[in-house]
Structure formats: C-alpha cells, structure tokens
Image (cartoon, helix red, strand yellow):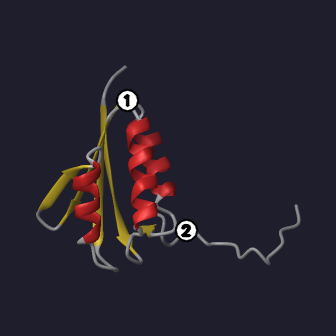
Amino acid sequence: MNNEIVSSNVIVQKRFSFQKMLEIHQEVKKITGTIYLQHKHKIIDASSLTKLVSFLLTVEPKATIKIIIEGPNAEAILQRFTLLLGNEVVSVKKQQKTQLIESSDSISL
C-alpha cells in the first residue's frame, strides 16, 4: 500500500475533557500510520499519551488545530478522526454544510 499524507483544520469549540483525550488516544493507537496535531508553532505525534494530553490542555476554545495524517488510507482515517472529535470540534471544511439534528427532531423518509 502507498502512504498518503492528508491534513485538515478544525476549530475547537470547548476544552477537551480527560475522558475525551483518552478516547482520542485509544483511537490513534488502532490505526496504521501516524497522526500529528499542530497548533501555533507546536506539533506533536498523537500516539504519545503524555504529549497528547499536554498539547490538548493548552488548546483554548475557538483555536484552530491542524490534523496531519500519514499512512495508508489517510483520507478515511482523517474522516474517522474528525468524527471522533465531533463533540469538541467543527471541521472548517464542513462547517457550512453540516447541520446537527436534535434528538427530539424526526425525519420522514
């Protein structure tokens, strides 16, 4: 398989909880490839729990984080990782197209 490199920017809506950081780390450990997170002038490999926690604790709400993924199927991993962060971030690329449905809403097909 060929390695790919993809990236996307996300805007942090609120601070990350420690539970969410652990979930992100568990998901990162499952993939084949490397996920880097960049904010301002700092870039980290998300597979290191201590670096991930330290990094995410410094990210303020409304800040932009760049996700960089290197490996096979990088685009699919990027989508999965963005969905994992769904409660904390809104993708800059998809912000205008995505609308959330409230649990009280119903959809007729």
How far apart are the two marked residues, 1 and 2, measured between alpha carbons?
27 Å
Q: Which residue is mark 1?
A: 72
Cβ–Cβ under 8 Å for marks 1 and 2: no
In the rendered view, would you say 4 is above or below 105?
above
Which quadrant holds the N terminus?
top left
Where does residue 25 sit, x and y in percent of width and height?
38, 49
* Total number of numbered discs in the rendering: 2
Q: Residue furthest left?
A: 41
Where does residue 51 sit, x and y in percent of width and height?
22, 54
Q: Which residue is mark 2?
A: 97
Is disc 2 surrounded by few (<14), some (14 to 19) or many (20+) residues within 10 Å?
A: few
Where does residue 45 sit, x and y in percent of width and height?
23, 47
Which quadrant holds the C terminus?
bottom right
Residue drawn where x is 48% and y is 70% of the image: 95
Find residue 3 and report its image quarter. top left
- Dot 1: element: loop
Query: Residue 2 versus residue 103: which sits nearer the camera?
Result: 103
Amino acid carrying label 1: it is Pro
Query: Does residue 93 appear anywhere in the picture?
Result: no
Where does residue 75 sit, x and y in percent of width and height?
42, 41
